[in-house]
Image: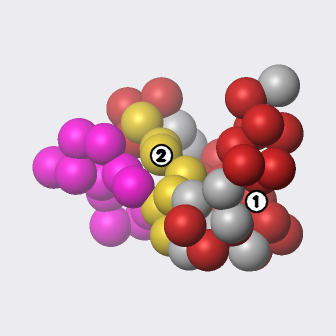
């Protein structure tokens, strides 16, 4: 619901997808990157940057 409201109210080039890394796997990160590309979002924001592995 919030995603649909954001896409209607805010241009996609102004939206950023937030990712909380402790709960992510490399595969789920790739899925999130696909979402960014599909909806034309400008970027991602990664929480807890110190926990990002080289694989991600």
Q: Residue 51, can we see it?
A: no
User: 53 left or right of 12?
Assistant: left
Q: Position of residue 2 (x, y in %)?
A: 73, 29
**Circle 1 SS class:** helix
- Position of residue 39 relative to residue 24, above or below, is below
User: 10 left or right of 50?
Assistant: right
Q: Position of residue 54 (x, y in %)?
A: 32, 67
Q: Nearer the viewer, residue 7 or 43?
A: 7
- Position of residue 32 relative to residue 23, above or below, is below
Q: Position of residue 31 (x, y in %)?
A: 73, 55
Q: Which residue is mark 1?
A: 35
Magenta stretch? 45-56
User: 47 left or right of 35?
Assistant: left
Q: Is residue 17 magenta?
A: no
Q: Is residue 54 magenta?
A: yes
Q: Are marks 1 and 2 in contact (CB under 8 Å)?
A: no
Q: Quadrant of residue 38?
A: bottom right
Q: Residue 37, can we see it?
A: yes
- Sequence-first tag of 1 and 2: 2
Q: Residue at x 23, y 41 (%)?
A: 48
Q: How far is disc 1 from disc 2 in space, using C-alphas?
A: 12 Å
Q: Position of residue 43 (x, y in %)?
A: 50, 70
Q: Residue at x 74, y 74 (%)?
A: 40
> Badge 1: few (under 14), some or many (20 or more) residues near its Cα, within 10 Å?
few
Q: Residue at x 31, y 42 (%)?
A: 47
Mark linked to residue 18 = 2
């Amino acid at each position: 619901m919030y995603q649909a409201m954001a896409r209607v109210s805010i241009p996609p080039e102004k939206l950023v997808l937030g990712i909380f890394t402790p709960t992510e796997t490399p595969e789920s990160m790739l899925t999130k990157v696909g979402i960014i590309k599909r909806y034309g979002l400008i970027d991602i924001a990664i929480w807890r940057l110190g926990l990002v592995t080289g694989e991600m």
